[in-house]
Image: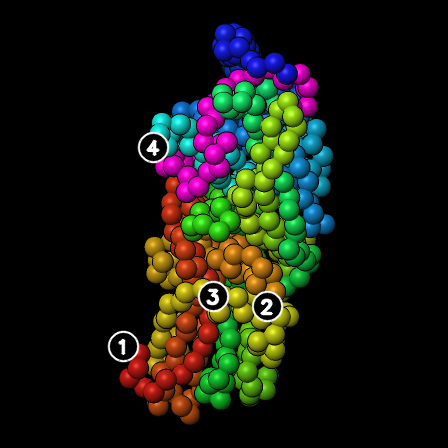
Amino acid sequence: MAAPRLGAVAKYAAIVAAAAALTLAALALCARPVVSQGPAYSVAYYSGLQRALQLEVVNETGRPVVFCATLYGWLPNGSFAQIGWRCGEGAVSMDKSSLDEYLRHFAGVPGEVGVIAFITYVSGTDRSGRPALARSAAGFTVDPREALRRDAVRVTMRVKSRGAPRQERAGSMSMAPARLEWPEPSISEYCYVDYSTYDVICYYWRLDRIYGSEQNVGIPLVAIRVAQDYDKVNRLHAWAYLRLEANKYLYIRGSGAVRYLGTGPPEYSGDIWVYKLYDVGVYLNDSMHLLLGYDYPVQPVILAFGFYGDWAAARYKEVEVHWPSGYEEETGYVADIYLMKPVLSSGKMVAYKEADDGIYDDKGPSKFFKSAAARWSYKTTCGDYYARANTTYVVSSVSGTNLFAIGIPLPEPVAGLLDVTLTAGVGADKLELIVLLGMVKLADNVAGVYDVFARYYVTPEEFTVGPYSTRIGSLYIDAYAAPQGSCR
């Protein structure tokens, strides 16, 4: 391909801008769309247009950015399907058929289904005045019923403006955004041009490996471990109450970490959405009690209470593509993601309850507890007769947000391979819609001699969650006793 002339580029840019304006005008003239809002995205469903999935990416001020986006969906069998890849400025259009095929797997979900978006975008300039690239692992949710019966789905996502990247390769640092016409329709018509070589450069994110996944397994929302003072503890209690009221949503969340391998800390995102449930009603209302020495032996134990569900953990790598040579190379940036979702039966969650004496193995509830206890931070609450922690207490103690109220750690042995800070979990528009409780009570014969402590684990790093940056707390609790008067 001959080196592009800047005049031709400008002419093509004008043509594309005019086409984009006509598309927006068509959207305005068609029937009023159905619009769904998320904390960091919005989705509109249109009829009467050419079938398309349209993606718009803007910064915090609403200004369009130059970007490349790769979209993936998490299938029920634990695998990942690519939904689309496109580069552009402000907004791009993709074939909608892959999205439709993905959504057909979730027709019975009482709400919206998540799509994962890996975005490489221009965010300001570096110290030399050249464009600086930033990366984001986030997502949005789509209603299968609306999307499948409508012609077009338009998604708007917000990304954060960032400073210069920690490290870039020489070729990338010489790039400037440009619009170029491609000779092959399978390649995006918007990418970057390296004016030193006139190579056109695009970015996409490729699935590198799935580190682990399970379907229909017990996933603890509340887990209480008694490792040493089991002869002093009498009662363990866990309760979960998840419900929805009109015009509110229940969020099932995942998280991601984007990093340049070998340098600097990762950037954590809690904006990876798996489900956005909205059917009014109670999704889970159950509890579990354990009396040591009565219905369970006096021995080490983990009480686990939650729901049956699926989880998966995977790594994606960013790839730089040169045209016309077709040369590809990895940039060194990776994104680790951890996803979780409940199995729904007749639109409700299925309660999971287990008392496990294998408190340090990599099976059952201990595989989730192990990584948090070994690698997360913790906070403590205590009492002279019992200690308890609930959703409201945990969220307030970490200055958290109800949008990602409670976290679920990565299970072992996957936690030994990926970033252990990653967490899945649940959130809601109102914290009162998620009531999770863990309580530990001392035996009567030692209540006047000991205090009881509940150590609950929280992520050591902050996550971006909608407009917030926050640590995520859990109701994974280590219970132990100490001489009376220690609780002060």
Mark with earlier residue (2, 1): 2
Check whether the beta carbons of the residues at disc 4 and disc 1 lie within 8 A of each other: no
Q: Residue at coordinates 61% horizontally, 50% vertically from top-left?
A: 314
Residue 448 placement (x, y as % from top left): 35, 89
Indicate yes or no whether the magenta region holds residue 163: yes
Of badges 4 and 2, nearer the viewer stands 4
Q: Amino acid at mark 2?
A: Lys
- State the mark number for residue 318: none
Taking depth in this image into account, of 401 and 164 the one nearest to the observer is 164
**The residue positioned farthest toward the front in the image shown:** 196
Magenta-colored span = 159-187
Q: Amino acid at mark 3?
A: Arg
Compared to 30, does 108 lie above or below?
Answer: below
- State the mark number for residue 375: 3
- State the mark number for residue 127: 4
Q: Badge 2: few (under 14), some or many (20 or more) residues near its Cα, within 10 Å?
A: many
Compared to 421, does 7 lie above or below?
Answer: above
Taking depth in this image into account, of 334 and 408 the one nearest to the observer is 334
Q: Whole-Å distance between the Cαs marked 3 and 1?
A: 26 Å
Residue 260 placement (x, y as % from top left): 49, 46
User: Residue beneath label 2, please?
Assistant: 367
User: Residue beneath label 1, please?
Assistant: 488
Q: Whole-Å distance between the Cαs marked 2 and 3?
A: 13 Å
Q: Badge 1: few (under 14), some or many (20 or more) residues near its Cα, within 10 Å?
A: few
Mark with earlier residue (4, 2): 4
- How many numbered discs? 4
